[in-house]
Amino acid sequence: MKDGDTIYAFSTSPGRAAIAVLRLSGPDAGGALKALGGKLPKPRQAAVMMFADPRSGEAIDRGIALYFPKPSSHTGEDMAELHLHGGRAVANAALEALGAIPGLRLAEPGEFTRRAFLNGKLDLTEAEGVADLIAAETAAQRRQALRQMSGAAAKIHEDWRRRILLAQARLEAEIDFPEEGLPENLRKAAAAEIAMLRDEIGASLKDKRGGEILREGFHVAILGPPNAGKSSLMNALARREVAITSETAGTTRDVIEVALDLGGYPVILADTAGLREAEGAIEEEGVRRARKRAETADLKLAVLDASKPGEAKALGGFFGGDTLVVANKMDLNPKDGAAWADALGSGKAVRISVKTGRGLDEVESRLREEVAARLSSGNAPLITRARHRQALEECAASLARFSGITAPELAAEELRRAVRALGRLTGRVDVEDLLDVLFREFCIGK
Ligand SMILES: Nc1nc2c(ncn2[C@@H]2O[C@H](COP(=O)(O)OP(=O)(O)OP(=O)(O)O)[C@@H](O)[C@H]2O)c(=O)[nH]1
Ligand SMILES: [Mg+2]
């Protein structure tokens, strides 16, 4: 792979569509567009053109051409766009014609974004924002990705980096010129600045993983005794028959997942096996999986059969915090089962009947509230990936060590480490191993 090559690829998914966009980037992008369209449009102005194969002169399609000379383009290189009709024959003819032009080659997955990154058009978190925006499936995911793509996180990281560098410079002035009578308070100023930064970075780490959960989905595990109506509730919430339900206790064994859009938040519901002393190895494995799911879920949705108060009693110790309790089968006019359900959860249980539909709206709105409370915690979260958290934790740890060190050389070394951790976050340093993995996310339709 050579970065000086001119690359081309469709930016739109393959298959039939009204329009398909073919992009070129590199020194020969303008030349190639001229070869197919006969002329170069004015920079950044759309022009209708007949595109033809330069070898035979045979017409390929009539479409729109755009030309973006460097450096004001997405990649920072000369770029061209051909808006063609989206069909296989047109696409193949255009790709063949471009392939025959010397110096041009098909782009590798993610290569356009990679070039934009290498040319300083976006930092790593902004590039991740682009990938997240393309992958976004709910409104809240879209908002978060758009914010990140627009540089909200990059701006803050860069501000932190600059301030640590300034503190480092102050400290190093003291190390390099100890006898020059530099003001005593240089080190103090550096220490005060770092203390402030520790607070700011510490606050961003205390985000209850909101950004990561929003990106990946909020996991809700449906748990409870066998036959309580867990699978029935999941089907009702999903509005389709995802899981098998039956009057036989122990019907569900595997964990069954379904993705929901709950008021703009992505929620992954997991139905699990009923919790009891299992009958046989398969059910036992199902119960083990249910318990494991309970441990990793962001929220537990406990479903109890309100007509069987004994079951609620037996499960008393299991759920703990982060549990929304639901008392099902209220249509059977239970006596004190619902009261037991109340006792299980921290608040009042939601009384429902999947059979009659009673209370289902309330379950949905309570779920939505729980998710919204976790995911929209005041300030917009900066951290949307484990990679971000790791880098910020390293940075915070270095700053914490800095505050405990008196020898200026060692203190300065901790600041250098902190800067390096932030550099990894934005992609200033140590990115080589990340680039390939990351930019593959931009690969459209492959
Ligand atoms: N009367 C009544 N029956 C219900 C209600 N909800 C579910 N059922 C019935 O209860 C039985 C068990 O429902 P499931 O949804 O399979 O229960 P489950 O909790 O998934 O059971 P396991 O998978 O065996 O743990 C089925 O026969 C359902 O039709 C309800 O609100 N009222
Ligand atoms: Mg079930």
Image: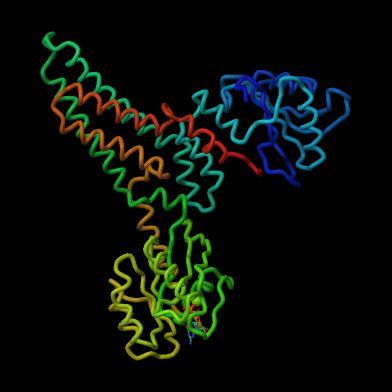
Image spot of residue 392 (x, y percent): 33, 38
Res. 226 visible in picture: yes
Image spot of residue 245 (x, y percent): 54, 79
Task: Name the residue rendered at 12%, 15% in the picture.
Answer: 183
Q: Quadrant of the C terminus?
A: top right
Q: Quadrant of the N terminus?
A: top right
Taking depth in this image into account, of 416 and 24 the one nearest to the observer is 416
Task: Name the residue rendered at 15%, 24% in the picture.
Answer: 407
Taking depth in this image into account, of 71 and 399 the one nearest to the observer is 399
User: Which picture quadrant has residue 244?
Assistant: bottom right
User: Which picture quadrant has residue 147?
Assistant: top left
Image spot of residue 432 (x, y percent): 48, 29
**Label total for image:** 0
Image spot of residue 184 (x, y percent): 10, 18
Task: Name the residue rendered at 72%, 39% in the picture.
Answer: 20
Please, is residue 54 above or below residue 311 in the view?
above
Task: Name the residue rendered at 36%, 42% in the picture.
Answer: 389
Taking depth in this image into account, of 55 and 332 the one nearest to the observer is 55
Q: Residue furthest top?
A: 180
Q: How is the image coloured?
A: rainbow
Horizontal side, residue 123 vs residue 87: left or right: left
User: Which picture quadrant has residue 45?
Assistant: top right
Horizontal side, residue 137 vs residue 218: left or right: right
Q: Residue furthest front?
A: 281
Res. 231 visible in picture: no
Please, is residue 393 above or below residue 53 in the view?
below
